[in-house]
Structures are given as C-alpha cells and as structure tokens.
Image: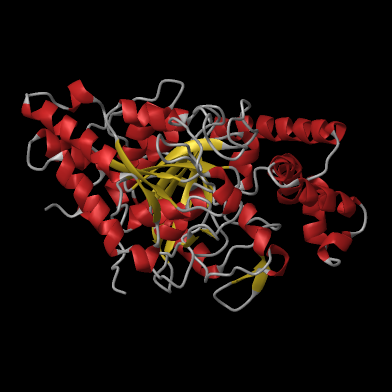
C-alpha cells in the first residue's frame, strides 16, 4: 500500500492511471489514516464513507475498461476531505454549530466542481465556530491538534484541513480565507495553500454567511490546499471561474524580481519566524532571484484600520443579534472590552455606518492603486504569514488572549491579522509555501503575493520554489 504522505494528488492520479493502485485502495488508506490519528489530531470530524466507496469503485471500473483520468476527470479517484464550512451532499456545513446540521443540502459550488472532475469526497475537517478564529475547536466536535505538536493549534479556520494534509489523511482540501484562514494553517502545519484573487472562485454553499445566503461576502475567498504547488494549480483550475491552466511550463527563479517585505513598524514578527524567512530569501537569491528588501508597500497602521472596517461588519453580521447590540455600545469609550482600546477599535469597526464604510472602501481602492504600481517594478512580494509559529491551545475569551514570542515577549492576539491584511484587503492572490523550520522545529511559511488576477504567476513561483528549494516535509507523527 502506498504511503499517502509520500504522494501528492498528481502522483496518486499517475499511480491509478498506471494501474499500480486503485481509487478504492487510496480511499480506504485515507480513512484508515484518519481513524488511526483520530484521538491525537481530531482533524476529520464527519464522514460519509459508503457513497465515497461506491464512487471509487465506479472510477476503478472505468479505468479497468481502459479509461484514464483524461477521460474520467482531472481528479479521477483522488480521495478528498472538505473544510466543514462547505455544504457537501449528505454532510451539510456545521461551521461548528449543531443548529446548522440536519439540513437537506447539495454540494457547495466548489465542492461540486471537484466532484464533477472525479474527486472522491468522504469527510469534513474541523473549524472554529463560524470560521472565526486562528484555532480550530468547537463544542460540537472538539479541538483539532497540530501534527507537528499536538499541544499546539494547527491554525484556523482551515485548521482541520491543514492538519489532515500534513498528517497524510488527505492530499487535497478546499478552504476559505477572510482573515488568513487558508494561509495561517498552511504556515502552522507546513503545507501549501492559495488565496485566490477575490471573486475567482464561487462562494455559493459556504457557511458563513447563513445557510442559503445568495450574496457573496466581501473579502472572503475560496481556495485550494495541498501538499504540493502543482496540486494547488490543478485544483484551482477546477474551482476557478476563469482560466487557470491545470499544468504550466517549468518555471525558474533566476531573474525573478522579488520584493521582500519583512520589516514593518506597525507589525511584529517573532525572531524565529524572521530568521526562517531571511534564510528562505537567501536561498531564493542563491537560485538567481533578484531579491530586494522593500519598505511597507502601504502604511501598516492605515492598512489595518481600513481592513478592520471592511472585515468586522461582515463578521458581526453572522453573530446573534445580542452580540451585535453589545458591539454597538463600544462606538464611544472602550468599555465593552474593559478599557482595552485595541478590542474597542474592533467593536467600532463592526458597527460602521454605510457612509463610513464607503470612506474605508475608497481608502482600499487607493491601496490597490499603490499595489498596481508596486507590481510594475516587482514580479512578486514575499512576506511572512503569521507573526509567530503554531502556538499552544488557548481557549480563553478573545480579549484575554495573547501570543508569546520565542523570547517570552507578549503580543496582542489580533496581531494574527497583520501580515495577511494586505492581500485580503486589496483582493490580491497569495500562495503560501513552506519556508523552513523554526529553532523549535515548527513550520514557518511565507506568502507569495502577486498583482490582482496574477494567480498563475504566484503559483508558478511557488512551483519553482518547490522544485528548486524543496517543499512539503512530513511531520514525524511520533506521539
């Protein structure tokens, strides 16, 4: 039996087309790996294996008749799990809430596209409640642990997805990102993800917003997660509303013009993360990339101010009416959060008037203009994803949480929004790739940010990095 952790989805397809292993064998190995690690990781939280086995057998029968993946579908026979914020036929999205289960539903748009191309979807991966945290836990399904260290979070909100990828449970996942939810789990677990240009992939069937919503929220995107860059490209070519080639010509790093954004007065980055990113940049330069350290493309404080004003009205709209009324009390003094000015700023952002939102939207458009000029000089911008590596589980109320740096310094919990804000606020594509390990042996990722619509470019750079510098490495799972 092939070790799932030794193959990406593309390798699996090749093995099935060569008749070395069947789709059913891959599926059963995937489910078995999930069950073996259930108590330690709790990555997959809902299953529907029998329809998946029937689908795998049907694909095996077609291959036995001489058909290949070119005939059956681009993902013919690949076993997949899906983040539990997406509706799946027979497995409605819970988004961590019991009240969202029990609905009759079909596939979310992105899930349906993967299934049409032969993906064998069998399970759902864990998330925080309403996808609203950088940890993945809820009362319905419990806590998901990081496969590099079960005492730490795999990130959120696509934390179960990243843990399942890193531990060999699944080769592909569909995630979402409004506050780093694709990129932060990828960084914490050492896998790949791609935050597409805003609007490239349909959000229909994603929860939140509430089940059945017809509108697609601002800022939020749907994207692929994988153990290789080539798999990101393959899955995005299926999910995208526009043309993304499933395969691309070989890319090279020599001559690539890279802006390295690592120093921002308003943003903190732990010394171990910074060291790993600096080492990664040196390796890029060693392959002939033209790496230049750049100042912040836009003012960091202004960026966060605008981003929060765009983000928090969306988040608040999914909360109960009582929480929205409480937030309204904090438009003046910071009394809702016990005098904490940072959290009061979030509450004020959550209760913007439409006129205030229009002002923030105009400021965002000005940032977008600045970034268009930036990408006239540089091919890509490379930056950290998170200020720290995967941190120990902390389920205290948000306002009482802090992050600890490797030197013992404490930084605000909402610092997790800082480095991911630029690509999200401006609707830019950002591909997360493994950059190395910290001194504690924990993964560190970087994001490759490109111009709006430049998804193929950032994916090509990610694939070149993987081929020339290395990519995913599996955790030992020695626990």
Q: Residue 188, relative to residue 24: is it above or below?
A: below
Residue 457: x and y in percent read 43, 32
Q: Residue at x 8, y 35 (%)?
A: 18
Q: Which residue is outermost to the bottom?
A: 408
Left or right relative to 222: residue 179? right
**Is residue 254 visible in the rendered structure shown here?**
yes
Locate residue 438: give its quadrant: bottom left
The C terminus lies in quadrant? bottom left
Residue 456: x and y in percent read 41, 30
Left or right relative to 272: residue 210? right
Residue 188: x and y in percent read 46, 59
Residue 34: x and y in percent read 30, 57
Q: Residue 341, relative to residue 56: is it above or below?
A: below
Nearer to us in this view, 307 or 397: 397
Nearer to us in this view, 302 or 53: 53
- Indicate the colouring scheme: secondary structure
Q: Residue at x 7, y 42 (%)?
A: 20
Nearer to us in this view, 410 or 154: 154
Left or right relative to 417: residue 65? left
Q: Residue 347, relative to residue 399: is it above or below?
A: above
Q: Residue 379, relative to residue 145: is it above or below?
A: above
């Amino acid at each position: 039996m092939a070790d799932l952790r030794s193959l990406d989805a593309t390798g699996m397809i090749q093995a099935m087309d060569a008749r070395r292993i069947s789709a059913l064998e891959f599926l059963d190995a995937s489910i078995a790996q999930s069950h073996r690690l259930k108590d330690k990781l709790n990555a997959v939280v809902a299953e529907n294996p029998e329809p998946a086995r029937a689908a795998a057998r049907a694909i095996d029968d077609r291959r036995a008749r001489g058909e290949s993946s070119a005939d059956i579908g681009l993902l013919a026979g690949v076993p997949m799990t899906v983040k539990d914020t997406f509706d799946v036929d027979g497995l409605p999205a819970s988004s961590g809430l019991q009240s969202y289960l029990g609905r009759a539903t079909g596939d979310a748009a992105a899930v349906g596209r993967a299934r049409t191309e032969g993906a064998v979807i069998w399970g759902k991966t864990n998330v925080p409640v309403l996808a609203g945290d950088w940890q993945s836990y809820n009362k319905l399904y419990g806590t998901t642990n990081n496969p590099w260290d079960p005492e730490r979070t795999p990130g959120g909100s696509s934390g179960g997805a990243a843990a399942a990828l890193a531990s060999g449970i699944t080769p592909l996942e569909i995630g979402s990102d409004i506050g780093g939810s694709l990129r932060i789990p990828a960084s914490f677990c050492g896998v790949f993800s791609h935050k597409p240009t805003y609007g490239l992939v349909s959000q229909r069937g994603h929860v939140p917003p509430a089940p059945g919503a017809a509108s697609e929220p601002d800022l939020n995107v749907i994207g692929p997660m994988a153990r290789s860059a080539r798999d990101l490209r393959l899955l995005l070519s299926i999910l995208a509303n526009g043309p993304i080639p499933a395969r691309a010509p070989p890319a090279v790093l020599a001559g690539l013009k890279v802006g390295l954004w690592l120093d921002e007065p308003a943003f903190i980055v732990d010394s171990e993360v910074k060291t790993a990113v600096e080492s990664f940049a040196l390796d890029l330069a060693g392959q002939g990339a033209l790496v230049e350290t750049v100042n912040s493309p836009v003012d960091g404080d202004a960026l966060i101010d605008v981003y929060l004003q765009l983000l928090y009205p969306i988040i608040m709209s999914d909360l109960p009416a009582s929480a929205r009324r409480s937030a309204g009390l904090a438009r003046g003094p910071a009394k809702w959060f016990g005098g904490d000015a940072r959290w009061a700023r979030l509450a004020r952002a959550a209760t913007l008037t439409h006129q205030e939102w229009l002002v923030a939207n105009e400021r965002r458009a000005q940032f977008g203009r600045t970034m268009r000029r930036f990408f006239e000089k540089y091919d890509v911008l490379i930056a950290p994803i998170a200020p720290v590596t995967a941190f120990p589980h902390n389920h205290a109320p948000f306002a009482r949480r802090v992050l600890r740096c490797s030197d013992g310094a404490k930084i605000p919990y909402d610092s997790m929004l800082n480095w991911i804000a630029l690509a999200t606020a401006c609707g830019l594509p950002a591909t997360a790739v493994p950059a190395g390990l910290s001194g504690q042996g924990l993964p560190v990722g970087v994001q490759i940010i490109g111009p709006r619509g430049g998804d193929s470019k950032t994916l090509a750079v990610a694939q070149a990095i993987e081929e020339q510098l290395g990519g995913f490495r599996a955790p030992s799972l020695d626990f």
